Image (cartoon, grey):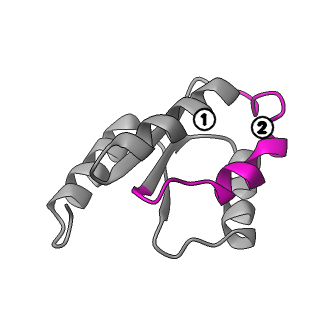
């Protein structure tokens, strides 16, 4: 979990365009160990070009924690979307890429 976050942050900073993150929790039953300890740090270190987070699945606790983290560390230019299936996520992502102003 921690390695994946570090890798995303490292890779996103070298990509010269907007980055959307898809987090698939459909097979997850609980939060990863230590996840709540790193939410705040992660929220404070979101690369500038990462502007969309799509969470697929996830239990109500996870979604509540992410929403609370977003309220504590607001990033109005970043979107946090919750969907229930990978198909919904890909549909939203396709619409997002077609929106005016997307680059």
| Quadrant holding the N terminus | top right
- Asked whether 10 falls inside the magenta stretch, the response is no
Q: Residues within 10 Å of mark 2 (few under 14, many from 20)?
A: few
Disc 2 versus disc 1: nearer the observer: 1
Q: Position of residue 30 (x, y in %)?
A: 76, 30
Q: Which residue is mark 1?
A: 5
Magenta stretch in the rendered image: 28-51
For image coordinates 76% across by 55% down, the residue present is 40
Per the rendering, the mark at residue 32 is: none
In the figure, is residue 34 to the left or right of 53? right
Q: Position of residue 28 (x, y in %)?
A: 65, 26
Q: Are marks 2 and 1 in contact (CB under 8 Å)?
A: no
Q: Position of residue 95 (x, y in %)?
A: 21, 58
Q: Position of residue 41 (x, y in %)?
A: 74, 51
| Residue 38 to residue 97: above or below | above
For image coordinates 53% across by 41% down, the residue present is 9
Instruction: Looking at this view, name the residue that lies furthest to the bottom.
Output: 76
Q: Which residue is mark 2?
A: 35
For image coordinates 67% across by 49% down, the residue present is 42
Instruction: Looking at this view, name the residue that lies furthest to the front.
Output: 14
Q: CA distance from mark 2 to mark 1?
A: 11 Å
């Amino acid at each position: 979990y921690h390695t994946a976050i570090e890798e995303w942050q490292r890779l996103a900073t070298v990509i010269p365009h907007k980055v959307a993150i898809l987090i698939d929790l459909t097979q997850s039953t609980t939060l990863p160990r230590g996840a709540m300890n790193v939410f705040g740090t992660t929220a404070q270190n979101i690369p500038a070009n990462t502007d969309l987070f799509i969470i697929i699945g996830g239990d109500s606790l996870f979604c509540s924690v992410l929403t609370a983290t977003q309220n504590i560390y607001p990033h109005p230019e970043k979107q946090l979307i919750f969907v229930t299936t990978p198909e919904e996520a890909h549909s939203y992502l396709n619409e997002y890429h077609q929106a005016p102003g997307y680059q």
